[in-house]
Image: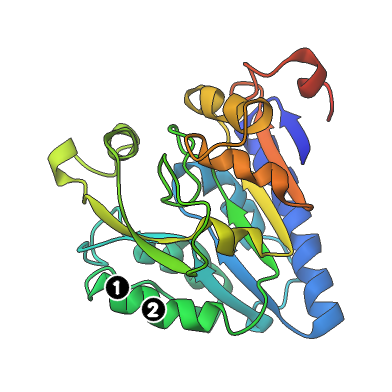
Amino acid sequence: MKINIFDDKSTLGRSAAAHAADSLRTYIRNQGYVRLVAATGASQFEFLDALTSTPGIDWQRVELFHLDEYAGLPSTHPASFRKYILERIVGKTGITHHHLLDGERDPYAVAKEVGDELASKPVDLIFAGIGENGHLAFNDPPADFQTKEPYLVVTLDEACRRQQVSEGWFAKLDDVPTKAISMSVQQMLQAKEIIVIAPDTRKAPAVKACVEGETSPMAPASILRQHANVTLYLDTNSASLLTRRVAGAN
């Protein structure tokens, strides 16, 4: 796992975007297309703003999936990840080949349909974040490290749901759905490359567990250490609990 640490979220976002743009161009140049999975959430704002403004990416050659979606949430809701993807990625790039997780339909049917599409070819690149509880996508602790299903229907724990309230996506805890569709951990690990964007002090304990703790379903993002091509983008706040040896490794 390569770790890059920056003084602020804007610099972090620009650097991660430059990396992502280079990877997208390389996959397109080498194979004619790229299969991309995008994360959503507040941690991705600066990164996606920088990436979608980067010139020289042939977005018509990008096939887009996303990591997760709430079950039962309409696409008009501010917290809808479909809404996020359409506004922050599709609308800014003109991507036409995308597979959105429809939270208003039967989540098990959606997981199967989109999962079959996802599994039909290798995934090239994933953009991911790390939750305050260490979750990866919506795989809350204890995460299922074994299942080979591309997407799962999961139950969100209270820490995850409280994070959504604290970030302003929902007014109160009772408004946050308890179920979601999430890409599985094993499916994520099959991607050729993973770029993780995780700024902010509130992520520091989860980042420390991911980088320095035991690989455990209780710290789902810790599984990333088993992947051969992961780059973790942190700011000084999210890296604040790392040891000097690790923090100096960038």
Give the number of marks: 2
The quadrant in which the C terminus is found is: top right
Tell whether 201 sits left or right of 32.
Answer: left
Q: Is residue 13 above or below residue 132?
A: below
Residue at point 35%, 36% (across, down) = 167
**Residue type (three-letter) at the residue carrying disc 1:** Tyr
Task: Using the image, tell me which numbered label, if any, was put on residue 207.
Answer: none
Residue at point 73%, 57% (across, down) = 20
Residue 80 x %, y %: 31, 59
Local crowd at mark 2 within 10 Å, few (<14), some, or many (≥20)? some
| Residue at the disc numbered 1 | 108
**Residue type (three-letter) at the residue carrying disc 2:** Lys
Label 2: which secondary element? helix
Local crowd at mark 1 within 10 Å, few (<14), some, or many (≥20)? some
Task: Using the image, tell me which numbered label, if any, was put on residue 112.
Answer: 2
Residue 154 x %, y %: 33, 56
Residue 197 shows up from this direction: no
Q: Nearer the viewer, residue 112 or 175?
A: 112
* Cβ atoms under marks 1 and 2 closer than 8 Å: yes
Residue 153 shows up from this direction: yes
Q: How far apart in space, not on screen, are marks 1 and 2 (Cα)?
A: 6 Å
Q: Nearer the viewer, residue 150 or 214?
A: 214
> Can you tell which quarter of the image residue 140 is in?
top left
Label 1: which secondary element? helix
Residue at point 37%, 71% (across, down) = 101
